[in-house]
Image (cartoon, rainbow, N blue to C red):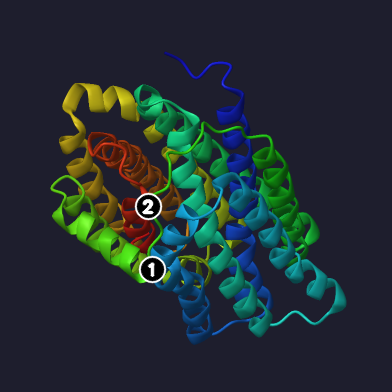
């Protein structure tokens, strides 16, 4: 079996990769805009990071139940269009001279809420696009494409910020969402299983939590993601701020570190199927979860200069390579559990995993 010639999966992959290129541009432009242009204080950076993550924490589980009630293709298209409109606020206010930290707060909160719905649909639609025997291959391609898109978007974002400025660079992110929406409109999915009788959303969320808690293969994954997600959130809050102010990388150095990290993600995703076949999913998950925090240690000692730029780039590449291996394996295991559970909805697993990202 092969994914070659699979038009719907290709459309899905192209659309999601395109929006990720825009998101990578966003990732370079946002800290440059907040720290270097709006002169944000540490407290403001912390609030911005909090507002980015708040929708995921609040909406992830309800999002799963909502997605289960609606056509996933439609959700992908509508959320892409909404994201394009939200992001467009930043370059518009930059041109008008009214850009401020409160504007970034509002964009972060709105975009975060829309992104939660989009991610829930994007995860859940893949098993409707490909057969169970192709899930591992599909996950590998998704991880590889996302790694390549992240790397390309990061370097593109660095160049765009240097040429047109951080505020106007968000126009590229907005355009990427529009192209993603068009690609999503081309998707054709297999008929979804007959829906069960609808119950109250709270009951479905509770059922999802109990399903995760009682499933031996899913419960350890969720606990591991809880630990690594908590630590990653603490680190990422001030990661770019620390690099720009203490390590003094500048936007170019920040782009280099992020670009090499994205290349590591690409390498890890491509290597994941072969590594899993040789060592098994359990060992791959353990190694991936262990390496991810260890690669953050150099950040504690880094200072200005090309040596530390090299060290942080290599550490970032290895960190995201480990994350990609673990991530593609985790999704395949989760979806495999769903298949073994006689077609049980993926929403409980998806909601839990999204809540811990």
Which residue lies most toward the top here? 1
Residue 105 image-quadrant placement = bottom right
Inspect this view and state whether residue 30 appears: yes
User: Mark 1 sits on what residue?
Assistant: 200
Sequence order check: which comes first, mark 2 or mark 1?
1
- Residue 127 drawn at (x, y percent): 43, 35
Give the labeled residue for mark 2.
Answer: 347
**Left/right of residue 198 with respect to residue 332 in the rendered view:** right
Q: How many marks?
A: 2
| Residue at 61 percent of width and 66 percent of height | 30
**Residue 143 appears in the figure:** no
Closest to the observer, 210 or 333: 210
Position of 61 relative to 135 (above/below):
below
Residue found 68% across the figure and 80% down from its top: 103
Task: Say above or below: 151 vs 37.
Answer: above
Residue at image point 56% right, 21% down: 6
Name above or below for residue 349 compared with residue 283: below
Q: Measuring 35% from the left and 28% from the top, which residue is drawn there?
A: 136
Q: Residue 132: percent from the left, percent from the top?
A: 36, 27
Residue 276, percent across and down? Answer: 24, 28
Image spot of residue 272 (x, y percent): 33, 30
């Amino acid at each position: 079996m092969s994914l070659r010639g699979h038009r719907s999966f290709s459309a899905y992959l192209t659309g999601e990769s395109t929006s990720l290129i825009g998101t990578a541009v966003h990732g370079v432009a946002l800290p440059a805009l907040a720290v270097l242009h709006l002169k944000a204080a540490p407290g403001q950076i912390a609030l911005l990071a909090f507002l980015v993550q708040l929708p995921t924490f609040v909406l992830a589980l309800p999002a799963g139940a909502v997605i289960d009630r609606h056509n996933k293709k439609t959700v992908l298209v509508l959320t892409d269009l909404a994201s394009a409109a939200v992001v467009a606020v930043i370059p518009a206010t930059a041109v008008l001279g009214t850009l401020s930290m409160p504007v970034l707060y509002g964009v972060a909160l709105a975009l975060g809420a829309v992104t939660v719905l989009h991610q829930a649909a994007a995860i859940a639609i893949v098993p409707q696009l490909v057969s169970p025997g192709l899930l591992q291959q599909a996950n590998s391609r998704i991880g590889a494409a996302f790694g390549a898109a992240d790397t390309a978007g990061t370097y593109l974002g660095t160049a765009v910020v240097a040429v047109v400025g951080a505020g106007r660079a968000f126009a590229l992110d907005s355009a990427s969402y529009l192209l993603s929406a068009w690609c999503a409109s081309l998707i054709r999915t297999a008929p979804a299983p007959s829906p069960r009788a609808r119950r109250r959303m709270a009951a479905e969320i509770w059922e999802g939590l109990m399903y995760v808690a009682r499933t031996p293969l899913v419960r350890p994954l969720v606990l591991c993601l809880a630990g690594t997600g908590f630590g990653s959130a603490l680190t990422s809050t001030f990661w770019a701020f620390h690099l720009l102010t203490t390590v003094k990388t500048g936007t170019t150095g920040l782009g280099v570190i992020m670009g090499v990290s994205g290349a590591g993600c690409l390498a890890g995703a491509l290597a994941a199927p072969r590594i899993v076949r040789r060592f098994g999913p359990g060992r791959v998950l353990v190694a991936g979860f262990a390496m991810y925090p260890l690669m953050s240690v150099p950040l504690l000692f880094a200072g200005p200069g090309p040596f530390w730029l090299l060290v942080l780039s290599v550490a970032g590449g290895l960190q995201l390579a480990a994350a990609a291996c673990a991530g593609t394996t985790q999704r395949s295991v989760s979806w495999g559990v769903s298949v073994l559970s006689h077609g049980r909805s993926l929403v409980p697993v998806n909601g839990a995993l999204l809540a811990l990202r």
